[in-house]
Image (cartoon, coloured by chain):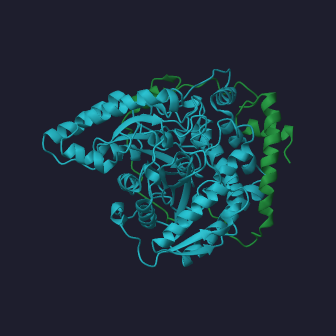
Chain colours: A green, B cyan
């Protein structure tokens, strides 16, 4: 079971502002989805290895060579705010959170 | 242009009966006529398409040989990056995003001379089963405009079904190609995981995402897959294998001794009788064509749904952390960085995306990881084992693609779980990384298409094409067109 307080906490972890309406809605909906997940406990998985990738491929390696991106200006232009060669962000050290 | 195929158009181009510009112009006219009803496209790239078409025509005029896809109008799901052309993922958070690079699949199609006519609608970030979760518009099912086209690649499915383009690309994480293909009466294929490069595909759940073709017949799907498959060093999960010419597997007769397995568990509760009947008839037809048919049990198949709705949102919650209003996308101003993240993400993401981010963040959070994510990964192994055992006995598995035909718009939007259930039959295939195809196999009493799903072993796309083509040649379903 997940309660409203936990929903708030998860939203904070996910960096997602949610309204009190959403809080209520998500609490109900996540609970019914988590209930649905309960059926997995019917299966004994004690000695079953987890699958992390559908198709096994061995480690893929390549030389770590510097390759300048072909459209640096377009890349920077995609940012909401930029200054010269940098992305600009608001003040970082201003809140208790940061 | 309704019955047009890649080969048919190619012949017309080679014989100079029609020019690529003529074909493209007619396609764009059809799009302009139908879009007010279907709303399959988020953007129509008319100038770009005509430019590509002109290139094809000048090649033909110069007497050069043209590739099979040269001058063929194609739709691209709007979660594949196209350099200089807006790519939104149907999300408000990417409403203004113009990629500075090209995805591998669209680059390959561009190099092959295909003519992209537009970017198709989807459920935001490919999360959904009806395309109703698009942040911009709701796409209609061409067979009944009051119904959904399925999702998440609903725009591509609807565009191909209504002949707004000849073929299209979609992506499939839990059924997002096969389910809309079934609901729109077209062919849709999810290839083996790693067969097609994901470079430039906006990530949803990386261990499951795969790009694949939509077409109105099996041959076109085989041609398109051949054009996009292949190793790519920019995708570390890309398989380094030789890509065959898939059209060689399209034979007039079914291979002798071909073994077909019916997944027993898929014909249970929740399956519409009309769907069950159509798929059973199709299986009987395959038997007439010479296939050996037997029932196969995949007892853990049904656990695919809960496993998927743990794994996919978990991976999504990590993948979508990149939308931070710093490098691209929209930004909502705030006094400090954390507030900027949280307010931007609240404004930019739709409800289903938020729900899955919440679900995934919770499943991965301290104290719950073992109970949810690890448990799901273990059950994923059991589902794979069911398939492995099945493929020791048969060459191809068959089941319905979806439990029902297309549902009404709005019917399932208030209850996320009921929406999730429409992916029951397609999800286990992604979990095991296998190739799966949806193929038209009938219509219900209201005239809505029904699809059956063929599932192959790892990298056995050849068998899917072979069986699907033999069935298609023996039936008329693929020749029916929506009256639009």
Seen in the picture, residue B390 relative to B454 is either above or below; the reply is below
Which one is in front, B204 or B293? B293
> Residue placed at 71% from the left, 31% from the top?
A98
Q: Residue A83 at x, y = what percent? A: 49, 22
Seen in the picture, residue B227 relative to A40 is either above or below; the reply is above
The quarter holding residue B276 reads: bottom right
Task: Identify the residue at the far left of this view.
Answer: B62
Number of callouts: 0
Task: State left or right for residue A94 relative to residue B217.
Answer: right
The quarter holding residue B51 reads: top left
Does any portion of residue B459 appear in the rendered image?
yes
Q: Residue B212 at x, y = what percent? A: 46, 51
> Residue placed at 54% from the left, 69% from the top?
B284
* Image quadrant containing the N terminus of chain B: top left
> Residue placed at 86% from the left, 48% from the top?
A1
Q: Residue A85 at x, y = what percent? A: 45, 27
Task: State left or right for residue B295 relative to residue A24.
Answer: left
> Residue placed at 53% from the left, 45% from the top?
B184
Which one is in front, B46 or B200? B46
Q: Residue B173 at x, y = what percent? A: 57, 51
The quarter holding residue B469 reads: bottom left
């Amino acid at each position: 079971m997940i309660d409203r307080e936990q929903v708030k906490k998860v939203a904070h972890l996910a960096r997602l502002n949610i309204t009190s309406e959403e809080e209520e809605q998500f609490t109900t909906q996540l609970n019914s989805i988590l209930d649905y997940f309960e059926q997995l406990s019917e299966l004994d998985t004690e000695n079953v290895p987890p699958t992390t990738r559908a198709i096994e491929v061995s480690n893929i390696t390549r030389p770590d060579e510097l390759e300048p991106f072909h459209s640096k200006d377009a890349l920077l232009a995609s940012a909401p705010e930029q200054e010269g060669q940098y992305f600009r962000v608001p003040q970082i050290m201003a809140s208790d959170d940061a | 242009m309704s019955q047009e195929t890649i080969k048919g158009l190619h012949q017309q181009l080679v014989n100079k009966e029609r020019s690529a510009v003529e074909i493209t112009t007619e396609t764009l006219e059809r799009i302009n006529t139908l879009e007010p009803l279907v709303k399959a496209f988020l953007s129509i790239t008319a100038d770009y398409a005509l430019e590509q078409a002109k290139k094809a025509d000048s090649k033909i005029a110069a007497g050069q040989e043209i590739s099979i896809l040269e001058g063929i109008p194609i739709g691209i799901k709007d979660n594949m990056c196209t350099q200089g052309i807006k790519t939104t993922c149907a999300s408000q958070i990417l409403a203004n995003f113009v990629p500075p690079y090209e995805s591998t699949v669209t680059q390959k199609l561009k190099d092959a001379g295909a003519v992209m006519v537009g970017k198709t609608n989807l459920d935001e970030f490919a999360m959904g089963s009806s395309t109703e979760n698009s942040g911009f518009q709701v796409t209609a099912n061409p067979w009944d405009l009051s119904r959904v086209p399925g999702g998440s690649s609903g725009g591509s499915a609807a565009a191909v079904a209504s002949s707004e383009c000849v073929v299209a690309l979609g992506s499939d994480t839990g059924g997002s190609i096969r389910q809309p293909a079934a609901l729109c009466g077209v062919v849709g294929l999810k290839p083996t995981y790693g067969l097609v490069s994901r470079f430039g595909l906006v990530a949803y759940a990386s261990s499951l995402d795969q790009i694949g073709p939509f077409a109105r017949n099996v041959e076109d799907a085989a041609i398109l897959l051949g054009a996009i498959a292949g190793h790519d060093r920019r995708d570390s999960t890309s398989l380094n294998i030789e890509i065959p010419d898939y059209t060689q597997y399209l034979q007039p007769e079914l291979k002798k001794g071909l073994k077909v397995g019916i997944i027993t568990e898929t014909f249970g509760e929740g399956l519409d009788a009309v769907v069950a009947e159509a798929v059973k008839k199709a299986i009987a037809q395959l038997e007439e064509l010479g296939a050996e048919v037997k029932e196969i049990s995949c007892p853990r198949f049904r656990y695919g749904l809960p496993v998927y709705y743990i794994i996919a949102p978990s991976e999504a919650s990590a993948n979508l952390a990149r939308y931070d209003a710093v490098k691209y996308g929209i930004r909502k101003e705030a006094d400090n960085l954390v507030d900027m993240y949280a307010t931007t993400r609240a404004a930019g993401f739709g409800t289903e995306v938020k729900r899955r981010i919440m679900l995934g963040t919770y499943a991965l959070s301290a104290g719950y990881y073992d109970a949810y994510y690890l448990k799901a990964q273990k059950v994923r192994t059991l589902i794979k084992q069911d398939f492995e055992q099945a493929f020791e006995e048969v060459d191809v598995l068959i089941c319905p693609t979806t439990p029902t035909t297309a549902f009404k718009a709005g019917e399932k939007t208030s209850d996320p779980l009921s929406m999730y259930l429409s992916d029951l039959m397609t999800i286990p295939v992604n979990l095991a990384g296998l190739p799966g195809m949806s193929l038209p196999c009938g219509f219900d009493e209201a005239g809505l298409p029904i699809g059956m799903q063929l599932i192959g072993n790892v990298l056995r796309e050849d068998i899917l094409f072979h069986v699907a083509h033999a069935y298609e040649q023996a039936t008329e379903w693929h020749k029916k067109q929506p009256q639009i």
